[in-house]
Amino acid sequence: MYSCKPMGRIIAIDYGKKRTGVAVSDPMKLIAGGLTTLPSADAIPFLKQYVTENKVEMCVLGEPRQMNYDHSENWNRVMQFKSDLQKAIPGIEIRMADERFTSVLAHQTMREGGLKKKDRQNKAMVDELSATILLQTFLETI
């Protein structure tokens, strides 16, 4: 007999020095959608609130690496954020995922979607779309 347990969503986080892009999966974990971009200082309170209001089973955090796989300049900030997030939301698994091409793909997607140059320079939109790409790529591997 087939049993179906309740499914939680997965959140992806593209954490940056100034802004953080957030994306969320559908309950079946098939499709990623952009959720928001917010100041990085507000990310943990936002995520804590989101998790209390929605069933979330995992967070995927963008792992900042350079092309040669060395840590990027944002590495220490992301690791501190991960530690702070684990303390704030102890029941949620946090996985790291390679984010090296998400910004490039976000710009390419915006260009192919017909957005004007001015709209493509909207960094908040880029961050949210980067988180969405990060999450969709992750969903395709599970």
Image (cartoon, grey):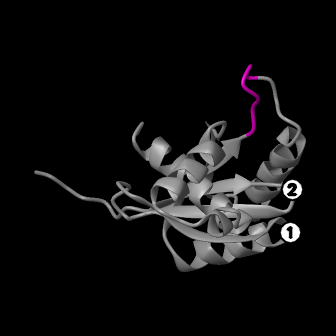
Residue 114 position, x and y percent, is: 48, 63
Circle 1 — which element? helix
Q: Looking at the picture, which amino acid does disc 2 mark?
A: Lys
Q: Is residue 82 left or right of residue 25?
A: right
Residue 140 position, x and y percent, is: 39, 41
Disc marking residue 97:
none
Q: Nearer the viewer, mark 1 or mark 2?
A: 2
Residue at left offset 85%, top offset 62%: 18
Q: Is residue 99 above or below residue 35?
A: above
Residue at which label 2 appears = 17
Q: Is 16 in front, or is 45?
A: 16
Which span of residues is magenta-colored? Answer: 64-69
Q: Residue 100, located in which quarter of the rendered image?
A: top right
Residue at left offset 82%, top offset 53%: 81
Q: Residue furthest left?
A: 1
Q: Is residue 136 left or right of residue 120?
A: left
Residue at left offset 80%, top offset 55%: 16
Disc marking residue 41:
1
Q: Is residue 108 above or below residue 25?
A: above
Q: Is 41 in front, or is 73?
A: 73
Q: Looking at the picture, which amino acid does disc 1 mark?
A: Ala
Label 1 vs label 2: CA separation?
Answer: 9 Å
